[in-house]
Image (cartoon, rainbow, N blue to C red):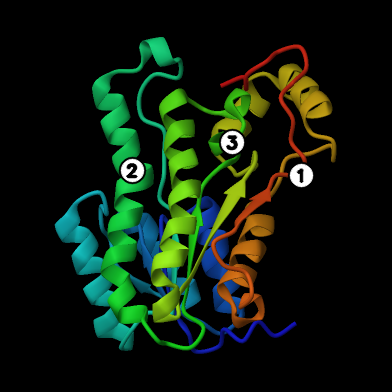
Amino acid sequence: MDLQLAGRVVLITGASRGIGLATAAAFAAEGARLVLSARGAEALHAAAAPLGATAVPADITDAAQAAALVQAAVAAHGGIDVLVNNVGGSPGGRRLAESTDDDWRRTLELNLVQTARLMRLAAPHMAQRPGAAIVNIASISGWTPRLAGSGQYGAAKAALIFETELWALDLNAQGIRVNTVSPGSILVAGNGWDRYRQSEPEGYADYVANGFPMGRLGTAEEVADVIAFLASPRAHWINGRHIPVDGLEQPHPARGRRPF
């Protein structure tokens, strides 16, 4: 299927590895023009070069750097057709009783505030461009507490899912669709699941057997394919929706919360 993304300008944050990098590759395969961003300049340039992408290192939790990123995308390509908000993370203690006020502030800034800021900055450069779309990356943690990495992370992702529908309503008049993709557990080299698999192979095998009806974790490419479709004109009748990509993941019946 031709996703009709050829020539479209796609800005992706958190694009140097994992789901962000897989998403960049998916859009590149469709002929899109890419602007990729992440904090680490070296890894970002290494990721961008094979894809022919424009690399803009930035910490988008900083308002000035976020604004500069959007301006760099517009300067390079004359506008923005697609924004993929992929940056996120879970600073601080995993248990609510261990989390601090600063953990909550940092987590909300990293997962929620910067996403709203980037949409606000990008929207004027996306307005009335045919097929303009925003895809926010939330998490299974946003609706299944026992699968949340931490309380503050789950709360931030739940808020992101909620605000996406409001953004869709607000930006509809400008011709911009806004949707959320919520990945379940994804196996990526070097991530938490990969480290758990290597350090506790029996525990990993038990958790997969009892928590994943499809018998495995997901891949970054499987999430990226959904993101690319949602951002494409092929999905023009999908707006303000929340799309889980989780393989029917369930909490382990005996262990309760995730192992890390």
Q: Mark 3 points at which residue?
A: 143
Residue 23: percent from the left, percent from the top? 55, 64
- The reply to whether residue 18 is in sight is yes
* Element at label 3: loop
Q: Name the residue under label 1.
A: 247
Mark 1 surroundings within 10 Å by alpha-carbon count, few (fewer than 14), some (14 through 19), many (20 or more): some
Query: Hey, what amino acid is under mark 1?
Result: Gly
Query: Hey, what amino acid is under mark 2?
Result: Leu
Instruction: Tally the numbered discs.
Output: 3
Image height check: is 99 above or below 184?
Answer: above
Q: Mark 2 points at which residue?
A: 110
Mark 3 surroundings within 10 Å by alpha-carbon count, few (fewer than 14), some (14 through 19), many (20 or more): some
Classify the position of the C terminus by image quarter. Answer: top right
Q: Is residue 71 left or right of residue 182?
A: left
Classify the position of the N terminus by image quarter. Answer: bottom right
Measured in 3D between alpha carbons, the distance from the residue under mark 3 to the one under mark 2, in whole angstroms, is 18 Å
Image height check: is 190 above or below 23?
Answer: above
Tell which circle, 3 or 2, labels the residue nearer the N-terminal end.
2
- 3 vs 2, front mark: 3
- Residue 231 or residue 220, whichever sits in front: 231
Residue drawn at the location 39% of the way across and 67% of the way down: 170
* Element at label 1: loop
Give the image quarter of residue 124: bottom left
Residue 39: percent from the left, percent from the top? 30, 52
Q: Is residue 80 left or right of residue 237?
A: left
Residue drawn at the location 31% of the way across and 71% of the way down: 122
